[in-house]
Amino acid sequence: MAVFESTVKRKPGTRSHAGRLSVSGGDSPAGQWLTDPNLPILFLYDYGGPGQKEVVVSKGLLVGVTPQRYNDDSIGFKKNALTIATDTIRPFGMAPYNFTKHWEDFLDGNQPSVITREYVELPLLQNATDAATVKYGAAYNDGADKLQANDLVTWSRDPQNFGKIVKFNESKHKLSDIIGQVGEVEDDQEPQGWMKWAMWDETARREDQDGVPNKSGYNAPGDGGYPYDPEYARLGKNGENGYFSQYYTTEGDATGVPGILDGKNRAMTVHSRDFSIPGGTTEGTLVQFNLGMKNIIDGTMKLFINNIETPGAHVELRDGVVAYVTKADDAGKNVRIDFRAEFFGTPAGWDYKGSLGAVRILLKF
């Protein structure tokens, strides 16, 4: 095809404006930022590899853009930096992985980036105090503002929880503060069910147990009886905690991989349930309260009548049903029951004290 010279010659006094317009898609903008060098180290990440252990922004935190700074890797040129969103820095996106510290003249740190429109999953904490102990991105119930499906969300202004997510409240926030919407809340006691069945196999059990020699020299018990693991007393023969064997025949046996799927930290959460004793109930009546959870931890259940702790109640640990025999003046009174429960099968990313489960959010930056 012929190219006419008149169309390609530079025309004095004019310019073509042929520069780029679209830089990248918006789901994960292809910008080049620095990690804010003033951020303190949040924690050391043992799995980060060389130069990637000192985390200053953890995965799942909301991040905003700071003014330009000089980049020591390209002397003389400036770049904007990404930092944790605060009460004065609005978020630009979410950190999709850990940002690590970069020290000048060292080959460490990593290139930060953001996601702006993804469907993300975060642990859901019951209050700000519990959320403050979580090192990674999280969502939490802010007082009476409890997250439910379809709620709009914004970022936390609490200094102990910068970068985390709370429910949007039109009396506290502006419409421009909305950064996403809740699609799902996952608060089952045993998420997916099957994950509690993922445990060490019998080979691992034998390796662990055979590594402890019998130093007594004989098989008869001493004055104190045979030594035993306290977990054996709590879970029974079928509950050799975290090991899978041929003895697992009922739903209640499985406990999940220790430290990964056993929900150990989530089991530290104290739950409360409110009930009432019907008016007209006579003395000596057996009343029952269903806690709505199973596998209650022995010794953690407390029953309060009109806010006074009352002994004498009995709880079926596996079924989560509390039985109480009423006294003469109990009719019509309020009942509160506090307890802790096991959460076998909880993914490690949700396993925190105060965790209610997980929340899935569609980011809308």
Image (cartoon, rainbow, N blue to C red):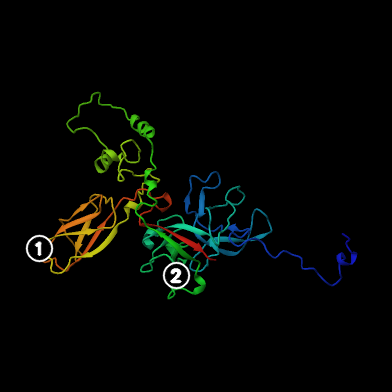
Query: Does the CB distance between marks 1 and 2 fall below 8 Å?
Result: no
> Residue 50: which quarter of the image?
top right
Q: Amino acid at mark 2?
A: Phe
Mark 2 falls on what kind of element?
loop
Name the side, left or right, on which 186 lies relative to 114: left
Q: Is residue 124 rendered to the left or right of residue 313? A: right
- Residue 323 % position (x, y): 18, 56
Q: Where is mark 2, residue-wise?
A: 168
The residue furthest right is 5
Q: Residues within 10 Å of mark 1 (few under 14, many from 20)?
A: few
301 versus 146 height, above or below: above
Which image quarter: residue 293? bottom left
Residue 292 position in % (x across, y down): 28, 57
Residue 143 image position (x, y, % from top left)? 36, 67
Dividing the image into 4 quarters, which one contains the C terminus? bottom right
Name the secondary structure under disc 1: loop
How many marks can you see? 2
Q: Residue at x 50, y 62 (%)?
A: 362
Q: Earlier in the sequence, mark 1 or mark 2?
A: 2
Q: Of circles 1 and 2, which is in front?
A: 1
Residue at 51% across, 69% down: 88
Amino acid at dot 1: Glu
Q: Is residue 175 left or right of residue 202?
A: right
Q: Which residue lies under the disc numbered 1?
A: 283
Residue 180: x and y in percent read 49, 66
Res 125 quadrant in image: bottom left
Give the Cα distance between marks 1 and 2. Answer: 48 Å
Residue ranking furthest to the top: 217
Q: Residues within 10 Å of mark 2 (few under 14, many from 20)?
A: many
Task: Identify the residue at horizontal 67%, vertical 62% (top origin).
Answer: 23
On screen, 211 above or below 46?
above
* Residue nearer the viewer, 264 or 284: 284
